């Protein structure tokens, strides 16, 4: 294993019933690297992220986190998940808890951090992302953009080695997208290792070290964004990007 | 005067008039709503051979409270067992499913009889020497836990799967996810149906009277058969209403308060 490697996926296969969603995914993500997954809806981007976080049982293949085989049946999933943060498209904040409690639940119940320590860390994180005044609010009082930023803070509070972002701006009104993308930019500049499934091609082009195009359950093409967006080599990538351009999204 | 008030008064007045004008009205008022008999049965008079309905209701309250606490715990355990996914839990899942089918399918009064007469007949040391009220509460707990576990199950299912994913993604164990994320939301969703079951439970404590426990219904029955006046049953009915109506209002308030708090954002 390369000592810079954070995530390694080998021959990952996942089917729902008879439908094969992921059919032999291979991928290595290095430390501080930002990898964007693009592809049509249903191409398996979200499923791939959920498999990495062990939220889905995989049918074949192996996943390694920092060299440890997390697909080993003897591995404690809860321990693995404490090192991998995931942010969902629909935020999934806990509606019965205040913002502060949302953020401290994982550290207190998962990492067993003393409550005061977790609260102090949560305040620091909320402050860093301009959410400190929302600390005592319930999620349904927040805008979509604020909720998604809280969801990101909630994942960061676990101090993950790897952060997975699953179309985190897709459920947002257009005017709220920017504030969430700003947060991700800041994380990238801070060296956070991220795998980002996204439909924001402009953003992927700007932030990614590498872009993977998924189709038919495989990574059809991967390259640095400049190369993939300007001179894609695979016909499916070209067709996909053409459609994106026609829709005015690039 | 508001239209609603007027129409309410008109309807009530019509019903009262109908009752008063019925041919047997005087008769019914004498045998069911006789203030003297109502008072006598309420305070009781052991020397005359009848018990106080007002005191006897305490046994109902005690049975209800004991049963409710046990039901809330047992039903939750059953619901969680039934919803567990691990292969190790399969035998327990089967037991839970059979239990729910049986306990819901047998009429409560039969359960009361079976436990009330069956357990003493077993001649077991601790089990067979309890009072009728204990057997009655056991029957109530067994019957109601089956219903309430299904209410819990519906409540847990009403919380979106994505909440489980969010909780598990933070490294919470299955139990912690259930305890801190799923159950608090589930229970909020099921307060009205739970309350419904508990109002029903309060009334069904009267069924324990068939085992001879002197609870309100039994005391009223004894009064009526010694004096040949049914006003004691009306007293018992009023006492049950006094118990159930505040419970209903209290829960309405809980729901309203929770809603207001969440809508207002609010301080801790």
Image: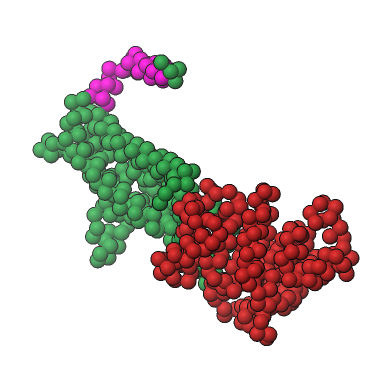
Report if residue B156 is visible in the image.
no
Residue A146 in picture, x, y percent from top left: 57, 53
Residue B178 in picture, x, y percent from top left: 48, 61
Q: Is residue A96 shown above or below A83?
A: above
Which residues lie in the magenta part?
B5-34
| Chain B image colour | green
Q: Is residue B190 shown above or below B121?
A: above
Residue B243 in picture, x, y percent from top left: 30, 39
Q: Quadrant of the N terminus of chain A?
A: bottom right
Q: Main secondary structure of the magenta part?
A: helix
Tell me which residue sits at (43%, 18%) in the image.
B2
Q: Quadrant of the C terminus of chain A?
A: bottom right
Q: Which chain is red?
A: A
Answer whether residue A200 is magenta in the image.
Answer: no
Query: Quick check: A189 left or right of A218?
Result: left
Tell me which residue sits at (81%, 68%) in the image.
A226
Depth check, front residue: A4 or B248: A4
Residue A84 in picture, x, y percent from top left: 59, 71
């Amino acid at each position: 294993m390369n000592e810079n490697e954070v995530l390694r996926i080998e021959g990952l296969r996942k089917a729902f019933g008879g439908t094969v969603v992921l059919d032999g995914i291979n991928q290595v993500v290095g430390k501080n690297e930002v990898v964007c997954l693009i592809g049509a809806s249903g191409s398996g981007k979200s499923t791939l992220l959920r498999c990495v976080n062990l939220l889905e049982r995989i049918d074949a293949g192996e996943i390694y986190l920092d060299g440890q085989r997390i697909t080993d049946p003897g591995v404690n999933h809860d321990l693995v998940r404490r090192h991998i943060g995931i942010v969902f498209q629909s935020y999934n904040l806990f509606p019965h808890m205040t913002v502060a409690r949302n953020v401290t639940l994982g550290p207190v119940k998962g990492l067993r951090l003393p409550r005061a320590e977790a609260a102090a860390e949560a305040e620091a994180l909320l402050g860093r992302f301009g959410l400190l005044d929302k600390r005592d609010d319930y999620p349904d009082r927040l805008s979509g953009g604020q909720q998604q930023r809280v969801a990101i803070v909630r994942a960061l509070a676990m101090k993950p080695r790897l952060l997975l972002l699953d179309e985190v701006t897709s459920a947002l009104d257009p005017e709220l997208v920017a504030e969430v993308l700003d947060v991700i930019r800041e994380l990238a500049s801070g060296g956070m290792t991220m795998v980002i499934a996204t439909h924001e091609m402009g953003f992927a082009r700007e932030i990614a070290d590498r872009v993977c195009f998924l189709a038919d359950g495989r990574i059809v093409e991967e390259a640095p964004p400049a190369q993939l967006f300007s001179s894609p080599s695979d016909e499916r990538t070209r067709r996909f990007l053409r459609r994106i351009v026609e829709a005015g999204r690039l | 005067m508001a239209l609603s008030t007027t129409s309410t008064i008109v309807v009530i007045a019509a019903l009262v008039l109908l009752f008063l004008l019925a041919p047997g009205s005087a008769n019914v008022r004498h045998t069911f709503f006789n203030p003297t008999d109502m008072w006598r049965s309420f305070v009781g008079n052991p020397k005359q051979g009848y018990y106080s309905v007002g005191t006897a209701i305490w046994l109902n309250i005690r049975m209800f409270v004991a049963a409710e606490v046990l039901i809330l715990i047992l039903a939750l355990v059953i619901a969680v067992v039934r919803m567990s996914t691990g292969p190790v839990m399969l035998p327990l899942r089967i037991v839970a499913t059979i239990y729910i089918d049986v306990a819901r399918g047998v009429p409560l009064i039969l359960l009361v009889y079976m436990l009330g007469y069956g357990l003493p007949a077993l001649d077991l040391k601790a089990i067979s020497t309890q009072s009728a009220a204990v057997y009655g509460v056991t029957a109530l707990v067994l019957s109601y836990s089956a219903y309430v576990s299904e209410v819990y199950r519906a409540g847990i299912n009403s919380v979106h799967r994505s909440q489980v994913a969010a909780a598990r993604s933070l490294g919470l164990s299955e139990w912690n996810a259930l305890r801190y994320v799923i159950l608090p939301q589930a229970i909020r969703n099921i307060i009205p149906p739970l309350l419904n079951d508990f109002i029903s439970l309060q009334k069904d404590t009267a069924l324990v009277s068939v085992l001879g426990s002197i609870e309100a219904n039994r005391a009223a029955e004894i009064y009526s058969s010694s004096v040949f006046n049914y006003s004691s049953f009306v007293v018992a009915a009023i006492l049950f209403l006094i118990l159930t109506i505040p419970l209903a209002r209290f829960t309405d308030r809980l729901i309203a308060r929770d809603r207001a708090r969440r809508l207002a954002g609010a301080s801790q």
